[in-house]
Image (cartoon, grey):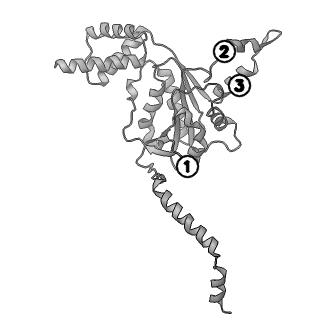
Amino acid sequence: MNGDDEDEIAYQVSPELAILLSRANELLARLEPWLPAPPPRVDWKTTLACRWRRGPVLGWLQPIDQLNCPPWAALQGIDAQKKAVERNLRQFVAGLPANHVLLTGSRGCGKSSLIKALLPRLAKRGLRMIEVDKDDLVHLPDIVAGIAGQPYRFVVFTDDLSFEAGEAAYKPLKAALDGSLAGLAANVLICATSNRRHLMPEYMAENLETDYVGNEIHPGESTEEKVSLSDRFGLWLSFYPFDQDQYLAIAQGWVAELGGAWAESARLEALQWATSRGSRSGRIARQFAVDWVGRQGLKR
């Protein structure tokens, strides 16, 4: 028996197996049009930011074509926070040790704007950003694995981060920050904002778990568990409501940034705007500036 005959015998299949393979091929042919197309590879040389999208089976990184990054100069009233976060991210893009960032405090005071404003400021140094919704943090290991070999420095940005008891995304984030044996890739830094200081709800009943040993106070296990997540962020900064002068300065700065002219009447209207909204925040100041510059433009 020659070699060709041996190969022919080796590849012979039974009629039943041949039918099974034929039917499997037919099934795959029918399913193929319904399968999602493989996501395109991201060209990080030309893409500054992506958003993680959850698919029926796997997720993918979707490039963000229109960036919403406020001008650095327009962020006023938070100079100390700007200085600290920018220094930390400059260390990061330079390949130096840097801390994960958690910004907490009052709504509309510039927490997320500060992170976003740093992207165009440091993009030429190799900074890139990936926006991940809170519910998609369960995919954090997959996201990190997909960018681990890239020559860029990535900020994984999550806005308005907070968890309710039992949410699935809580533990993957906790492990990624400082609890997993694998750890994060060296080119990945997590930056998050939250209105909650400890990222999770705190209840009055948890105070009853507190132990008092002499003059020392020992929080209960529930409190310790909640504090343990926020403690994993090395750089933790708080934001506070603005006073009247700060609010007006921010509003005036946004008017100038939008190409408008500040007038004495704008001061009174800006205060009335804040009173009607019940808040003096950077967001309210910017909304007033948009309205003011738009109305002045129509008059011209």
Mark 2 lies on a secondary structure that is loop
The numbered dot on residue 274 is: none
Q: Nearer the viewer, mark 2 or mark 3?
A: 2
Which residue is depicted at the point 66% across and 81% down? 10
Whether 267 is drawn above or below 153: the answer is above
Closer-to-camera residue (187/2): 2
The image shows residue 76 at horizontal and vertical percentages of: 41, 20
Quarter of the rendering occupied by the C terminus? top left
The residue at which mark 2 appears reads as 203
User: Whole-percent x and y of residue 28?
Assistant: 52, 61
List the residue tagged with mark 3.
225
Tell me the kind of residue under disc 1. Answer: Gly
Does 284 sit left or right of 222 as displayed? left
97 or 61: nearer the eye?
Answer: 61
- The dot on residue 146 is 1
Question: Does dot 1 land on a helix, a strand or a loop?
Answer: helix
Taking the spot 41% from the left edge, 41% from the top edge, the residue there is: 64
| Amino acid at dot 2 | Tyr
Residue 268 lies left or right of residue 143; in this view the side is left
Measured Cα–Cα span from mark 2 to mark 3: 13 Å
**Earlier along the polypeptide chain: callout 1 or callout 3?**
1
